Image (spheres, rainbow, N blue to C red):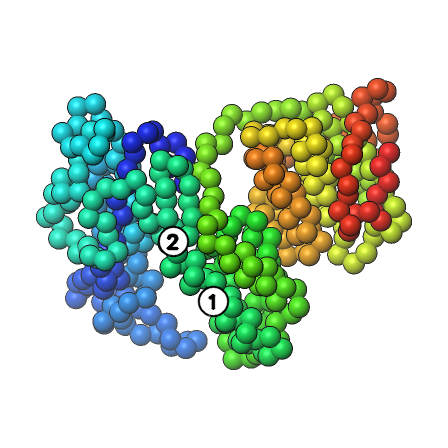
């Protein structure tokens, strides 16, 4: 992703896929005694055939792929990101390059690139590999538009994932399912969420449900309402096949002196530069599964609303928090706690509206200027921040703005 975000004008790429990747790595007879696979618990077998799908094959074949990349790098063909059997070879314009495409010159073309590794005899998949360098190409299931710096789902993938969700909703509405059914749809949507960023917070209901099976592949369970609601959201979202994600450089990190803190004894404190804001807890805030981690997460949500209202946009901002759990949750973009997850969803929706990229870092409580404010102390007179934004419905009975 960073490779395309920082790509200079004229950059092209070529996708290469190794045919029958897991079956192209030969096994020396002397190695067989150490190639062991497990069947049922307590049953182990020597892997004579080295079939598709065994972990040891991926490791062996991966070493061959690394060799390909190393040779290319030594011969001036780079960068080459790779994932299993998929390789993405880039080329950038060169003022003295002998190969031309439109207004650009390059140091190598498709044929020259493959000549460097021809002695290895790598079998390339004809249908899944590009036969020349392109400005728009497909890699690991996504379509990458290098000049426009966009990533999206190809039409066939978009329709495929939409159909997966539709079938699950139709097949298991009011009916039980197996763990494998949940794992399949969850894996598909985790992949899709790379483009549909607002879908990250719609995944915990699936992973929570999957964990309730306790790895038992034989039992069946009824999908909860929360999961089916999230899948209905995904179905509506996947109706739109033109969704793209912009791949822009993150830019320089700006420290605007942003601090947040929360305490269950009083409420939330926020520092923005030399200004401050506070929200006092109402008695009705405390319900099941709302705790200090939820409060700390909401503190960042409220800060996001302030920043959006201030008109900040298209920037990367440093935010300080003294709660490691909240930092980890926001880094992942989701939580298994439904209340925290909803706050994360609102936070990133606000940041996306303003194209703000948050960088949340840990600060000790004793060094956090928002700490005393979260405990009811007033900040400096005349530095209080006013606001006009409306709190989400679930927060209206939780806080009194002070």
On the image, the x and y values in percent for residue 299 come to 73, 39
Please tell me whether residue 177 is drawn above or below residue 116 in the rendered image.
below
Question: Nearer the viewer's eye, disc 2 or disc 1?
Answer: 2
Q: Is residue 54 visible?
A: yes
Q: Which residue is mark 1?
A: 164
Which badge, 2 or 1, is on the more N-terminal residue?
Answer: 2
- Residue at x 25%, y 68% (from the top left corner): 50
* Disc on res. 154: 2
**Could you tell me which residue is drawn at 58 percent across and 25 percent down?**
254
Residue at the far left in the pictured view: 119
Question: Residue 370: which quarter of the image?
Answer: top right
Left or right of 235, for residue 131: left
Residue sitting at 17 percent across and 53 percent down?
Answer: 122
Which x, y percent locates residue 218? 52, 80
**Residue displayed at 26% across by 42% down:** 134
Q: Secondary structure at mark 2?
A: loop
């Amino acid at each position: 992703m960073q490779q395309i975000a920082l790509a200079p004008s004229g950059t092209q790429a070529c996708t290469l896929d190794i045919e029958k990747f897991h079956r192209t790595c030969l096994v020396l007879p002397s190695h067989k005694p150490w190639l062991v696979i497990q069947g049922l618990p307590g049953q182990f077998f020597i892997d004579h055939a080295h079939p598709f799908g065994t972990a040891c094959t991926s490791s062996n074949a991966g070493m061959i792929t690394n060799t390909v990349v190393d040779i290319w790098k030594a011969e001036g063909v780079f960068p080459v990101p790779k994932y299993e059997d998929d390789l993405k070879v880039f080329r950038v314009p060169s003022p003295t390059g002998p190969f031309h495409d439109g207004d650009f010159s390059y140091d190598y073309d498709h044929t020259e690139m493959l000549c460097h590794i021809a002695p290895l005899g790598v079998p390339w998949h004809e249908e899944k590999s590009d036969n020349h360098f392109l400005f728009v190409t497909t890699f690991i299931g996504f379509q990458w538009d290098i000049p426009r710096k966009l990533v999206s789902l190809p039409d066939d993938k978009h329709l495929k994932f939409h159909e997966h969700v539709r079938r699950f909703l139709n097949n298991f509405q009011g009916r039980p399912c197996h763990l494998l059914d949940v794992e399949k749809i969850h894996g598909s949507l985790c992949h899709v969420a790379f483009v549909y960023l607002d879908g990250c917070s719609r995944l915990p209901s699936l992973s929570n449900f999957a964990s309730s099976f306790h790895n038992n592949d034989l039992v069946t369970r009824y999908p909860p309402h929360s999961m089916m609601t999230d899948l209905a959201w995904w179905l509506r979202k996947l109706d739109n096949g033109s969704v793209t994600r912009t791949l822009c450089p993150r830019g320089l990190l700006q420290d605007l002196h942003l601090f947040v803190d929360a305490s269950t004894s009083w409420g939330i404190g926020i520092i923005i530069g030399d200004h401050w804001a506070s929200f006092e807890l109402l008695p009705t805030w405390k319900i099941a599964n709302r705790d200090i981690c939820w409060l700390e997460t909401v503190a960042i949500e409220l800060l996001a609303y302030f920043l959006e209202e201030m008109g900040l946009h298209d920037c990367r901002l440093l935010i300080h928090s003294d709660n490691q759990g909240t930092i980890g949750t926001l880094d992942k973009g989701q939580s298994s706690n439904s209340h925290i997850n909803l706050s994360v969803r609102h936070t990133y929706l606000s940041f996306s509206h303003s194209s703000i990229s948050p960088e949340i870092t840990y600060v000790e409580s004793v060094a956090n200027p928002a700490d005393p404010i979260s405990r009811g102390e007033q900040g400096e007179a005349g530095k209080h921040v006013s606001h006009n934004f409306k709190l989400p419905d679930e927060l209206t009975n939780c806080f009194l703005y002070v």
